[in-house]
Amino acid sequence: GQQLNQSPQSMFIQEGEDVSMNCTSSSIFNTWLWYKQEPGEGPVLLIALYKAGELTSNGRLTAQFGITRKDSFLNISASIPSDVGIYFCAGQGSNTGKLIFGQGTTLQVKP
Amino acid sequence: EAGVTQSPTHLIKTRGQQATLRCSPISGHTSVYWYQQALGLGLQFLLWYDEGEERNRGNFPPRFSGRQFPNYSSELNVNALELEDSALYLCASSLAVIAVGTDTQYFGPGTRLTVL
């Protein structure tokens, strides 16, 4: 199936460090979304982006919708142990109902 | 406000059997989406239902089908189960697609289907 290119695949960082991950696509999207998934649970929405160039924050999380509409990044500042999980980007086209997901970035934080 | 709920949490079937998975959307949401999360394959779009109608379908065989009820809850049916159908099946819901952002999808906890 179709997937976005998400990098890095995994990160192992020290508590307090900043984290950056990104997604790229060959297709244009109208919406970019970032989700976090923990073991045994469904993805939880972190940030939604609806406009090219948009920069949105949610606490220590900041995400941007790329100007070309083909990419997005997510930054986490001052990481804490509860940030551990798998982070997914997702792009959505116009009125398809279909989210295209990245492969996920597994984040581990060392206290 | 209650989130998306799914049942059962776990389901174990044997090859060739049928599986039925259920989803209740967030109150006020009219669209329901189904995704398959299989190991190594990531999250793949299965189906989209809105106002009782199937609006879009992913690249899955006809063995995968579903429906949406008048109360907007939904069922996913998988017939003639195969070993590779073992996966976490996720349901998401959203408001109607009437403006930018109203169709943002919120996920349930999933049903873990194991086919032996």
Image (cartoon, rainbow, N blue to C red):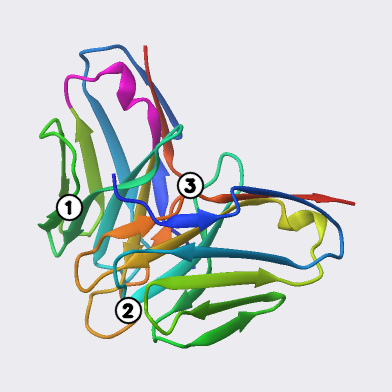
Amino acid beneath label 3 = Pro
Amino acid beneath label 1 = Gln
In space, the residues marked 1 and 2 are separated at their CA atoms by: 19 Å
Query: Residue B89: which disc?
Result: none
Residues shaded magenta: B79-88
Element under label 3?
A: loop
In space, the residues marked 3 and 2 are separated at their CA atoms by: 21 Å
Q: Which residue is mark 1?
A: B68
Q: Is residue A39 above or below residue A65?
A: above
On the rendered structure, is A84 left or right of B36?
A: right
Tell me which residue sits at (69%, 78%) in the image. A59
Q: Within the magenta stretch, is there residue B85?
A: yes
Count of numbered badges drawn on the protein:
3
Q: Nearer the viewer, mark 3 or mark 1?
A: 3
Residue in the foreground of this view, choosing between B52 and B36: B36
Q: Which residue is mark 3?
A: B109
Chain where mark 1 sits: B
Chain where mark 2 sits: B
Instruction: Tell me the quadrant of the picture where the C terminus of chain B can be found.
Output: top left
Q: Within the magenta stretch, is there residue B84?
A: yes
Amino acid beneath label 2 = Thr
Quadrant in the rendering for residue A57: bottom right
Chain where mark 3 sits: B
Query: Residue B102: which disc?
Result: 2
Residue in the foreground of this view, choosing between A23 and B89: A23
Q: Is residue A94 above or below residue B4?
A: below
